[in-house]
Structures are given as C-alpha cells and as structure tokens.
Image (tube, rainbow, N blue to C red):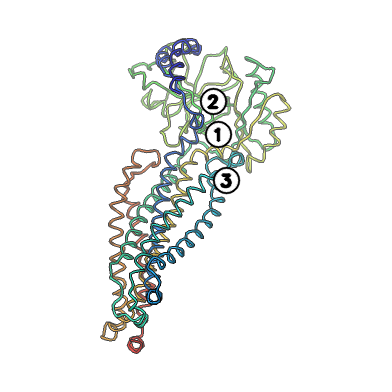
Amino acid sequence: MERAMAALRGVQPQIRQATVPPNYRPQDLPKYLKDPFSLRAAANGPNALGRQYRDPLTLIMVVVALVLLIACANIANLLLARASARRHELSVRVALGASRWRIARQLLAESALLSLSGTLLGLLAARWGARVLVLEMSGPATANALDAGLDWRVLLFTAGVATATTLLFGLVPAMRSTRVAPSEAIKEQGRSIVGESRFGPGSWLVAAQIALSLVLIVGAGLFMRTFSTLAQVHLGFDPDPLMIVSANARRSSAEGQGRTALYERLRAAAAATPGVRQAALLTITPLTGSEWDTLIENPPGMSLPESERDVWVNEVSPGFFATFGTPMLAGRDFTPRDTLAAPHVVIVNETFARKYFGGANPVGRSVRHERGPREDQSPLEIIGLVHDAVYDSLRDAVPPTMFRPFTQNETPGANTTIAVRAATGSPALLTRSLADALIHVDGDVTLTFKPYHDTVRAATAQERVIAMLSAFFGGLALLLAGIGLYGVMSYAVSRRRTEIGIRMALGAGPAGAVRLVLVRVATLVGLGLAAGTVLALWAAKFVAGSSLIYGLQPRDPATLVSAVVVLSAIGALAGYLPARRASRIDPARVLREG
C-alpha cells in the first residue's frame, strides 16, 4: 500500500493537470492541483453509510454495555439473595462432605444455564431487530438488498460476552455462598431478628443501577428531543403530496437543446396524467445531498469577502414553486418566455434578499456571477422573491439561494428530475399511470419513482434510529432498575420480618413499618441519582459539539430534571409495594413463629 501510494503521488501533478475540468474557476484551481491522492483498502473504502453511522453506533454500543451492566447487577443481586436463602441447604452439603469448590461449581453451572438461556433468547430477538434497524436506516427498497443476518463474528462476540458476564457476576456470589460452616445446618432455617446489612453488596448494586439508568434516560431524552426538533423543522414546502421522478436520457437520441424540449414534453405529459395537480422540472432535489453553488459579485455598496459571496443554485421550470407549495412573496414566476434569447433572470429566497439587499425587496435588482471563464457574465435580473425553504440539510440554516429558469440552460445534462404533485391521496398511487405517460413520450428514457416523503424521512434516519434505540434501552434500563430495587427491598422485608414485627408490637404500627422501608428506598434512590447526575454531566462532554445533538445543549437542565423525576417515580413505585407488604405483617403471628 505504501509503495503504491508513493507511485501514485509521483505522477499526481501530471494527472491533476491533465484532468482539470473545463471552465474551472481560477480561484479553485490551486486547491484542485494540490489535493493529494490517497489509497485505502476496499474493505474500509468510501462508504457513506459507514461514515454516517460510525459515531452513532459507537454510542449505541456504549449504551448496550451500560444496559448489560445493569442487567448483570440485577442477576448478581438475585444470585446473592438466592445464595443467602440457601445457606441452610449449602451448610448441609458441607456437613455431608461437599468441598467448597464443588459448591461453587454447582452455583456457577446454574449461572451459566441462566446466561445461556438469555443468550439464545437474545439471538432470536437480534434476527428480528437487525431487520428493523436496516429498514429504518436505508428504507424498504435498500433493506431487501442488505444482508441483516448474524455472521460468525457476531455470534463469537456474543458467546464471549455471555461467558465473561457469567464468570464475572456469577463467580463472586458463588464464592461468597461457599463461606458457610457445617454448624449452619443445625440452626433453625429462616430465623432472624435483624436481616442483612442495610448497605450490603445488594444495596450498592441497586444504587449503581439507578446511577447508570439515569445516564441512559438522560441520553434517551436528548436524542428523542433532537429527533423531535428535526422532524418539526419547517421545510418551506409540503412534501407529502410530491412524487419525485428521476429521468435519465443517456440512451435517448435527444441531445443539446433537444434535451430541453424532451424534458419539457416529459413534464407536460406528467402534468396531464389523471390525478396529477402540477408538475415541474428541477435540477437539485432538496435534502438529497446534491449541491450546486456559485460565487456572485458584490452588489453595489457591499464589500463582502469571497467566502461570504457563495450562494446555492437550483434550476427549475415554471410552476416549480406552486408544485412544491413554496409561497411567492414578490414579483413573478418563470414563464416559457424566459428563453435563451430573453434577458437572463433569477428568483431569490428571503435569506438571499436579507444578506445582499438588507432585507429590501430585491425584485428589479441585478446580480452578476463572479468573473471567471465558467459563468456567463451577463447580469441576472431578479424577477421574484420566494419564501425560504431547506436546500441540503435540516440542521443547517436556509442558505441564500438563487433559482434559474430551466429554459435558459445552454447545455442541459443527461439527467433531470420531475416533481409531481398529487391532487389527492398518496403520490405512490400515481407510479403506474405516470410511467405509462412518460414512456409514451420517449421509451429510451430511464425512469425512477420515489415519493418525496421517503426522502424527507431519510434525512432524519440517523436521528430516528438513535432516538429509537436509546429510548428502547433507556426504558429497559428503567425497568431493570425498578425490578432491582423492588427485588432488594422485597428480600430485605422478608429477611427483617421478625424485626419489623417486634417494632410493630412495641408500638411502631404499620406507618412505622412503611417508613422503615421507604427511608431505605429514598436513601438508595438518592445515592443513585446523585452519582448518576455527576456521571451524566461528565458524559455530556463526549456528545458536545457532535452532530448527535441538535437544538439543545448536552447538559440540558430540563432533560436532566425530567429524568430524575421519572426515575424517582419508578423508585417510589418499586419501594411502595414492599413497604405495603411490611405494613401488613401481623406482630402476634411473627412473635409466635419466633
């Protein structure tokens, strides 16, 4: 690879010089000539989908690891409680001659069986989940062509994680359980006045669960709000009734200006199709990643640097703004009379008018392209002002945009796009009739149909996938934390049943029993929330400045407070049930049993 790179860069000056695009702008030429060639392995080569999802999927893997830790803490708590309840049984085994290693081996085998069962269920769910993820990221058409199966590396990784978690979270409870003396066998099983330590391993594991759950819930809240904000961005047009038809005329006999006439016939045929309200031609379809920019000269009275005179361009036919539903604010739309022989005209958006004309009505004013061989130097008269609309990204502010008439293009390309607005119903229902009408015009034109709503949906695919996964794992973490807290408190109540009965017999009453349980719940939840808040604020720096968050700060107070409230409510519910059971303990019965 190194030798090939050196050889390629050795001939780079000649290759670059021989491939300068025609009419290249002089100011862009040095960058083109010096831009170094590079080689990369095909396995890690240019991959837009991989680059787009590398950071989000890394984040989701961290989330998965945190959920795994929470689940393992739950299992460790369960095994600790189970082992404590089996002390009598285990002491009998020791008294009968069982070695500590044999007991530990038995408990580890039980942990392995639990882990294996969970792994198999997880793999079954993963086959379905993988299809859902691919569908959300790429859409129905592409999803059918992508392999969403589980390959051996995924299975090997899953088996390794399952083995590691079994050893890590099963070994400690197993070794702890072997610390029983044979004398435990002669003690009466289940008698205890004071249960476990109030802040034993189980309590600390619950606090850790709550802390990690808070981090996940805060993250889920941030990503869901990001997706919601982007989904509600005003596009400047109505995408739902639009069908985008991509037409490729490379195989057609039409060339040069003949293509302009062909495209107009295709547009007219689409507009005349039953069920179609309007149709228009355009070169750049918004939100598809296509871009076309140009430099303009400083308007009279301005001295903006070159970097601030870059405007975005689109080439459209008459009726484009009505087709997309973009309001015309002043002036007129393009007409068939705006031909090559007529004065060159443009329509600009509000951002263009604010930046270059101070927000004044620009209709009747003129602009010129930056001087260079690529652009025509004739003035461009502004004949209309339209409402701002998105161009390339939902995240970016609407750029200054200039629309040129399709009929004034001297060298139309082999590709064009026809936007079709359905009169009623879904535009997808028009596919068959549109195809018949357009093929009748020229059967050699290659056509591709796509409802524009799918394009808008694809523009938020990354945010939607992150929001969906983070919400799922955040909810799962919340459920696990609640179950863990409930389990620990239920076990504590059962172990301290005698103590609670004596307290009630001495006058504490049911309210005292409830208070005894809820104070411990509040302590555990409070410790977990305090640690989780610190951890969430620290973790926020890893998403600050990234493209994962939009429209809010990573340390957003509202999201953090909402997460604390939700987790506190779950903790209160998880603690209320054991507390209610404690309040129903019969002191007389407990004393008789004691």
Q: Which residue is mark 1?
A: 324
> Which residue lies at the image location 51% right of the left edge and 36% below the top edge?
237
**Sequence-earlier tag: 3 or 2:** 3
Q: Taking 17 as reference, is 48 above or below it?
A: below
Identify the disc placed on residue 132: none
Q: Which residue is mark 3?
A: 149
Badge 1 marks a residue whose secondary structure is helix
Residue type at the position of mark 1? Phe
Q: Quadrant of the C terminus?
A: bottom left
Residue 176 place in picture, x, y as percent: 34, 66
Question: CA separation, marks 1 and 3?
Answer: 40 Å
> Which residue lies at the image location 51% right of the left edge and 15% below the top edge?
344
Residue 283 place in picture, x, y as percent: 55, 25
Q: Can the viewer see residue 282?
A: yes
Of badges 2 and 1, the one in the foreground is 1
Q: Write down the quadrant of residue 193 in the picture.
A: bottom left
Q: Taking 569 as reference, is 48 above or below it?
A: above
Apparent side of residue 252 relative to residue 85 in the rendered image (left or right): right
Neighbourhood count class around disc 3 (C-alpha, 10 Å): few under 14, some 14–19, many 20 upward = few
Apparent side of residue 17 relative to residue 429 in the rendered image (left or right): left
Depth check, front residue: 139 or 383: 139
Residue type at the position of mark 2? Asp
Q: Taking 557 as reference, is 404 above or below it?
A: above
Question: CA separation, marks 3 and 2?
Answer: 52 Å
> Which residue lies at the image location 39% right of the left edge and 74% below the top edge?
97
**Sequence-earlier tag: 1 or 3:** 3
Q: Which residue is mark 2?
A: 333
Residue 442 place in picture, x, y as percent: 71, 24
Question: CA separation, marks 2 and 1?
Answer: 13 Å
Neighbourhood count class around disc 2 (C-alpha, 10 Å): few under 14, some 14–19, many 20 upward = some
Of badges 3 and 2, the one in the foreground is 3
**Sequence-earlier tag: 2 or 1:** 1
